[in-house]
Image (tube, grey):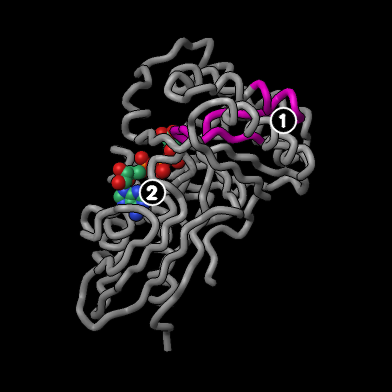
Amino acid sequence: MNKKEIKIFSPATVANVSCGYDVLGFCLDTIGDEMVIRTTERKGIFITKIEGYDLPLDATKNVAGVSALAMIADAKPDFGFEIEIYKNIKPGSGIGSSSASASGSVFAINELLGRPYTKTQVTGFAMKGEALASGSEHADNLAPGIFGGFTLVKSISPLEVLQLPTPKDIYATIIHPQIEIKTSDARAILPKTFPLKDAITQWANLGSFVHALHTSDYELLKRSLMDVIVEPHRSQLIPHFAEVKLAALEHGALGASISGAGPAIFALSKGIENAENVEKAMREVYSKTAIAFETYVSKINTEGIREL
Ligand SMILES: Nc1ncnc2c1ncn2[C@@H]1O[C@H](COP(=O)(O)OP(=O)(O)O)[C@@H](O)[C@H]1O
Ligand SMILES: N[C@@H](CCOP(=O)(O)O)C(=O)O
């Protein structure tokens, strides 16, 4: 007998990770949404409650509903689902707010259906929801949320996700200035073509970053966390980005860049002490401004979305 209700934690995620625009991501542990999903006799998807932020209850306008509708169109259950969303991740944050909802609903429905779908298939349904928010399909936030740890999306069609190892002593620091940047807008400002020399630099860094994860080579990781493609364009949308990045690097971070489409900025550090020093240094930069902000230090969440 399958369960009729499930409560989950759907974590925030960091996409791009400097050198891996649209393909690399990792999963956070200290911030995420909660969701309750239960079966109902009436067929369909019904978002019955959203707390935290003002988002549409209409399932066709909410990313959680869109991905869930895609899954039930395929599974064709003879019952429906109610979804409650308790949002902690501000929409337009750059730490995968839309992704947490789009993946949380389908993760939970898959559990309630007795797990007929693989993690890759669940990610495929979640992409339908994520596309509503960002204007195009990408899975670099969804994959780390669903698989946990660091992930690389090798291809979106057909969808292929690689799970990468997590070096044991690596921590993330996030600063989230409370301004909103819509992912769709941050995608629209990017040039359509890039100089070949920049592409060469970027794929060399991406390859060496993946190698560094496999070998726990922190020195190489530090030299690979660079972005010559996206960061130069998007950093203009984030007040004090250069100062925050410099402060993080001067206080022990291995690297720092824009988290997803921003405005959040992430740093990776070896050891929690360095990650906390980086947090303090990032806070000092924004404390001198009128912009409200939140910061988080997190281990890498290797489990991903979990049942509560
Ligand atoms: N359940 C949801 N959670 C978050 N955002 C949602 C949700 N449903 C629809 N949206 C819309 O998606 C956009 C936020 O997504 P996005 O710009 O990708 O930000 P983020 O980087 O935080 O994921 C907003 O326009 C928001 O209204
Ligand atoms: N690869 C995407 C990631 C967007 O992440 P989000 O957390 O800002 O939704 C992009 O950079 O556009």
**Residue 298 x/y as whole percent:** 65, 48
Classify the position of the C terminus by image quarter. Answer: bottom right
Mark 1 vs ligand 2: CB below 8 Å: no
Classify the position of the N terminus by image quarter. Answer: bottom left
Q: Earlier in the sequence, mark 1 or mark 2?
A: 2
279 shown above or below 246: below
Residue 254 - label: 1
Residue 58 is left or right of residue 55, and the answer is: left
Report the magenta residues as a range: 246-267
**Residue 110 x/y as whole percent:** 41, 69
Can residue 26 be found in the magenta stretch?
A: no
157 shown above or below 252: below
Mark 2 vs ligand 1: CB below 8 Å: yes
Tell me the SS state at disc 1: loop
Q: Which residue is mark 2?
A: 98
Q: Amino acid at mark 1?
A: Leu
| Residue 127 appears anywhere in the view | no
Residue ID at (20%, 79%): 42
Q: Nearer the viewer, residue 101 or 76?
A: 101
Tell me the SS state at disc 2: helix
Dividing the picture into quadrants, the one containing residue 170 is top right
Q: Amino acid at mark 2?
A: Ser
